[in-house]
Image (tube, helix red, strand yellow):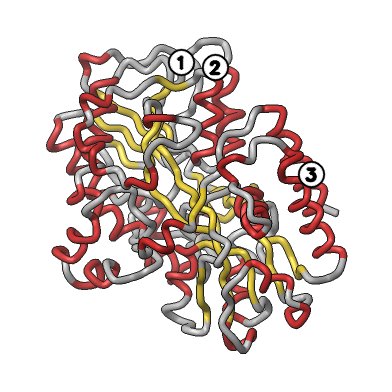
């Protein structure tokens, strides 16, 4: 019997077994392998996997819309699906030469519409291979480390690590400088995403999609509007608070509650008080549980009064449950984003530039936003969504996709951490979550 591997985000097993059609969405942090689902029960996937795919470009992404994923899975971003028969292995070997006009982009599951892939290949004539084997930042790092640390090449030309992992790859010298002169649409990059502290001038990376971590709450349970990080520590909500297992988002909010600028937090000592406060909240019973994406079910059901959550998740579940709200706290929220980086050793620089330039055209970026429903890093997307009409036009008015200037000013993004400091952060956070 053929089997599909199912991954669950955030280090926690799901409250119920994932349904057979639990199709992947891209969540902004890690997944853990939890089991196998018989492929024979996934008839639509079987038809896709076994069907003819002889036409370029190579496509290893899902065939359903993002909304289909939600309906079929019953959760928002519940898991990630590995299709090992479709996904190219990442290992040593020589990269394709530039004159072949080829490109290989390895992305997260459910994070690209098939139309964009096909249109790019048709318009440019580039032999475009697109796969979705990037399931977890640390897992993927371990996969490519043996080759890149020895100066060897890997198969993909472009990867999509989350910003903090992109910073790590840059520090290690495993990615190449972008030829920005061949990416004129880089001018459309949102101002708030320019010149991150770990990649000044965006010399090595460009944002792919972005999102916000703040406070999600069920107003039917809280009985009032929430405004501050301090609301998570209200004794009235004891035992009804959820906290994300994504360390940067959880600790980031606590640090901003202290008045700290997380872009300047580069050592564990600067963040130690936030870890201590989190540990105390857990020992006092204020925190019900640490979760990955599964927090959406508890939030909607009223098991959580409030939790640290992601804007994209609330955008989806609030359609069915208007009591569920999302805020960027008065103290601020964390802005996360996934990037596109050009892998060291790749010789397909012209194709890399063509792809990034294509995605930074507002018309193409809007089509992608309509599918994934994450915040686009590209200026002009809102206007293009309006032109698309229907549900796409409605997205143009959603403040979770297009926050106002006052909200954007309250967002902060972590800077890079050294390898030694990263270890300290991870070990301390793991000791609290697993205690």
Residue 428's disc is: 3
Give the crowd class for mark 3: few <14, some 14-19, many >=20 residues within 10 Å: some
432 relative to 50 in the view: left or right: right
Q: Position of residue 290 (x, y in %)?
A: 71, 61
Mark found first going from the N terminus, 2 or 1 = 2
Q: State the residue lying farthest toward the front.
A: 259
Determine whether the residue tagged by mark 1 lies in a helix, strand or loop. Answer: loop
Q: Marks 2 and 1: CB-CB under 8 Å?
A: yes
Q: Which residue is mark 2?
A: 147
- Number of the front mark, 2 or 3: 3
Determine whether the residue tagged by mark 2 lies in a helix, strand or loop. Answer: helix
Q: Which residue is mark 1?
A: 153
Q: Is residue 248 above or below residue 194?
A: below
Q: Position of residue 80 (x, y in %)?
A: 52, 52
Q: Residue at x 20, y 44 (%)?
A: 361
369 relative to 335 in the view: left or right: left
Between 417 and 34, the residue placed more toward the observer is: 417
Q: Residue at x 62, y 52 (%)?
A: 252
178 relative to 322 in the view: left or right: left
334 relative to 244 in the view: left or right: left
Mark found first going from the N terminus, 1 or 3 = 1
Give the crowd class for mark 1: few <14, some 14-19, many >=20 residues within 10 Å: many
């Amino acid at each position: 019997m053929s089997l599909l591997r199912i991954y669950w985000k955030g280090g926690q097993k799901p409250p119920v077994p994932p349904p057979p059609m639990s199709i992947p969405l891209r969540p902004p942090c890690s997944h853990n392998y939890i089991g196998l689902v018989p492929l024979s029960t996934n008839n639509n996937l079987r038809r896709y996997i076994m069907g003819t795919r002889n036409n370029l470009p190579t496509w290893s992404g899902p065939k359903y819309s993002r909304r289909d994923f939600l309906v079929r899975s019953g959760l928002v971003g519940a898991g990630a699906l590995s299709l090992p028969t479709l996904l190219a292995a990442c290992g040593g070997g020589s990269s394709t030469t530039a004159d072949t006009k080829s490109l290989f982009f390895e992305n997260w599951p459910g994070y690209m519409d098939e139309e964009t892939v096909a249109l790019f290949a048709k318009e440019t004539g580039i032999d475009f291979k697109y796969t979705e084997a990037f399931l977890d930042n640390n897992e993927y790092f371990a996969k490519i480390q043996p080759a890149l640390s020895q100066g060897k090449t890997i198969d993909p030309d472009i990867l999509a690590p989350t910003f903090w992992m992109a910073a790590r790859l840059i520090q290690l010298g495993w990615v190449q400088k972008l030829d920005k002169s061949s990416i004129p649409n880089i001018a459309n990059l949102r101002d708030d995403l320019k010149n991150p502290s770990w990649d000044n001038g965006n010399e090595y990376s460009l944002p792919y999609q972005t999102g916000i971590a703040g406070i999600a709450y069920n107003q039917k349970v809280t009985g009032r509007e929430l405004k501050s990080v301090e609301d998570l520590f209200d004794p009235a909500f004891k035992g009804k608070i959820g906290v994300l297992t994504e360390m940067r988002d959880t600790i980031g909010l606590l640090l901003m509650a202290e008045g700290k600028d997380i872009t300047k937090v580069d050592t564990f000592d600067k963040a130690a008080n936030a870890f201590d406060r989190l540990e105390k909240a857990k020992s006092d019973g204020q925190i019900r549980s640490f979760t990955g994406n599964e927090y959406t079910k508890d939030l909607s059901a009223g098991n959580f009064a409030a939790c640290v959550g992601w804007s994209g998740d609330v955008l989806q579940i609030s359609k069915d449950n208007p009591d569920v709200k999302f805020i960027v706290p008065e103290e601020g929220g964390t802005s996360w984003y996934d990037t596109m980086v050009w892998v060291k050793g790749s010789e397909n620089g012209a194709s890399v530039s063509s792809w990034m330039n294509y995605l930074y055209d507002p018309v193409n970026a809007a089509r992608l936003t309509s599918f994934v429903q994450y915040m686009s890093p590209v200026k002009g997307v809102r206007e293009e969504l309006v032109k698309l009409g229907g549900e796409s036009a409605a997205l143009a008015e959603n403040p979770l996709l297009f926050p106002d200037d006052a909200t954007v000013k309250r967002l902060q993004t972590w800077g890079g951490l050294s390898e030694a400091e990263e270890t300290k952060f991870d070990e301390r956070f793991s000791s609290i979550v697993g205690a």
